[in-house]
Amino acid sequence: MSSSTKDALLGRILTKTSVVGVVGLGYVGLPFAMEKAKVGYRVIGIEENPERAAKVNRGESYISDVTSEDLRPFIDAGRIRAVTDYEDVAGMDAIVIAVPTPLTRNLTPDLSHVVRVTHAVARRLRPGQLICLESTTYPGTTEEVMLPVLRESGLEVERDFFLAHSPERVDPGNKRYTTKNTSKVVGGVGPESLEVAAAFYGQTIERVVPVSSARAAELVKVFENTFRSVNIALVNELALLCDRLGLSVWEVLDAAFTKPFGIMPFYPGPGVGGHCIPIDPHYLEWKAKEVNFNTHFIGMAGEINRKMPEFVRDKAIRVLNNLGVAASRSRILLIGISYKRDLADWRESPALEVLRLLRESGANVDYHDPFVPQVSERSLSLASVALTDERLATSDLVIITTDHSCLDFGWIVAHARHVLDTRNATRGIAAEHVTLL
Ligand code: SAJ
């Protein structure tokens, strides 16, 4: 490895004169671009969605964790700009890739975005660049998928360019832990790559956690999300059991979480949404099969979590029957359609699945969500209805699917005929006509 190449890049990183490229200005890329601009780097975001790129260049943020007021000064000062193509890649010193890693319909990894972007970067790769993948993926992606493509440039890793994996750890909507103060795991395809990547992230993130390889870094992240999926599935399964036993899962969990050690709070719900927890563990499950290893927990957890919307549908129908209302002639209002509280994101939302299942049962179902004015997906397109006392009073059943903190659940309970609360949002509100998950 020519240390002059590495030293020159390190010099540009440490003096913050390097140009940072961020491929994908989503919930990971845009906050990261902001952190780099805040400490003085010039950032070029490659955002293939022209509307999004145009919004960024107008200083308009579409990511809840970045305000337009914060973004605009960096656009005006030319510190951040968005482009929709890869023409500027050769001028970048460090290129962070934060593009989606979804699943195919049969739950196998879809790396098409990562591969397409890597080819585009490889065509313009030059000596002295750091490439870092942040997208959540299975162990081996950076080395086995990206590196061969980058080598098509004729350049060699550790000699001409540096390649690392540093998994994003963004908890959308979390006001306490941000890109800056959330520790960052970094693994290089070799020691030089680790050194350069650790220096790069260390300029803006308070704590960098180096690991021995890119594969280790990839596994750290999918383990983190598997940990959540399995623990959420555990409490979801407990909710299903409590329903059979006639016990309150919320009472049991509240009491269990008074234990001051050796336990961690998770809560049941209508299912698991978002673009991480329902998806990432299946990347690990798929990779494990390659080495003839069965990851039982991942499969079981996914199955239980995916079953929750049906459980909510069945429980809703049971409640309606007890009220003497046939599901096929019922009017139901869902409170909350996004996948978790205080967010506008309704991707993979279990609430949407609950709505779909209830409609299939013949019910007339609407939703109210202050964060989501409109949803349109596949065969479904509907708008959030106004939350009025009249709407509540004329709904046979109100189902709380997302517990947005801005909602007045006391008022909702006071005006609803019956409430099915899948989030324990009505905690502390005594009312006979509230049924908990
Ligand atoms: N959920 C439950 N019960 C729980 C916790 C969550 O039903 O006890 C549900 C939520 O309602 C939501 C889904 O699971 O539908 C995912 O929840 P989440 O809090 O994991 O939300 P994400 O996917 O937006 O963010 C997660 C990060 N969250 C936390 O660490 C709290 C983290 O796992 C990852 O950094 C991030 O995904 C990512 O990008 O991988």
Image: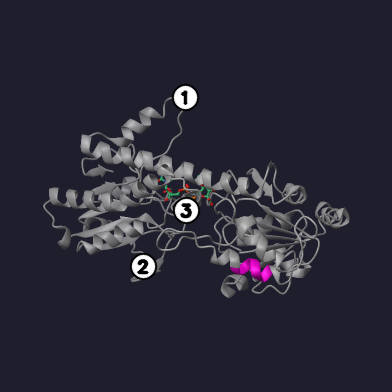
Instruction: Check mark 3 vs ligand 1: CB closer than 8 Å? yes or no.
Output: no
Task: Compute the Cα span from label 3 to label 2.
Answer: 37 Å
Label 2 sits on what residue type? Ala
Work out whether mark 1 precedes mark 2 in sequence or the reverse, and give the earlier one. 1
Percent x, y of residue 188:
70, 50
Q: Is residue 198 left or right of residue 300?
A: right
Q: How far is disc 3 from disc 1 in space, using C-alphas?
A: 36 Å
Position of residue 368 relative to residue 295, above or below, is below
Query: Which residue matches tag 1?
Result: 260
Q: Read off the magenta span.
A: 116-121
Number of marks present in the image shown: 3
Residue 383, labelled with which disc? 2
Q: Residue at x 41, y 42 (%)?
A: 297
**Residue of label 3:** 286
Separation of disc 1 and disc 2 at Cα?
Answer: 44 Å
Residue, x 36% and y 33% (percent of image)? 253
